[in-house]
Amino acid sequence: MKFISWNIDSLNAALTSDSNRAVLSREVLDTIIGKDPDIIALQETKLPYKGPT
């Protein structure tokens, strides 16, 4: 079983921004998807309960 855990420091920015950091975060997400894990765990403490803004 392949398990990937990532403590991402701004999922909201990664999903909604065009900053350099957001672009890099999306590249990491693409890399994770390319690894074809069985489980992906993302930890994000700042994401609003209603989702990305």
Image (cartoon, helix red, strand yellow):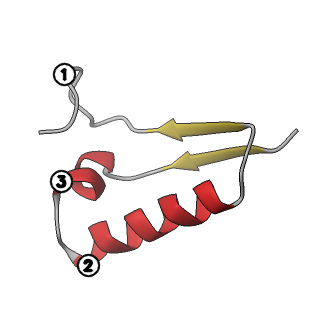
Residue on which the image places disc 3: 16
Identified at 57% across, 49% down, the residue is: 6
Cα–Cα gap, marks 2 and 3: 12 Å
Instruction: Quickly name the residue at label 2.
Output: 20
Q: Tell me the residue at 51%/66% (across/down).
A: 28
Distance Cα–Cα, label 1 vs label 3? 14 Å
Crowding near pointer 3: few (<14 within 10 Å), some, many (20+)?
few
Residue pointed to by mark 1: 50
Q: Is residue 29 above or below residue 38?
A: below
**Quick one: which residue is furthest to the bottom in this view?**
20
Which amino acid type is shown beneath numbered disc 3? Thr
Q: Residue furthest left?
A: 53
Q: CA distance from mark 2 to mark 1?
A: 25 Å
Q: Secondary structure at mark 1?
A: loop
Q: Is 36 on the left-hand or right-hand side of 24?
A: right
Amino acid beneath label 1:
Lys
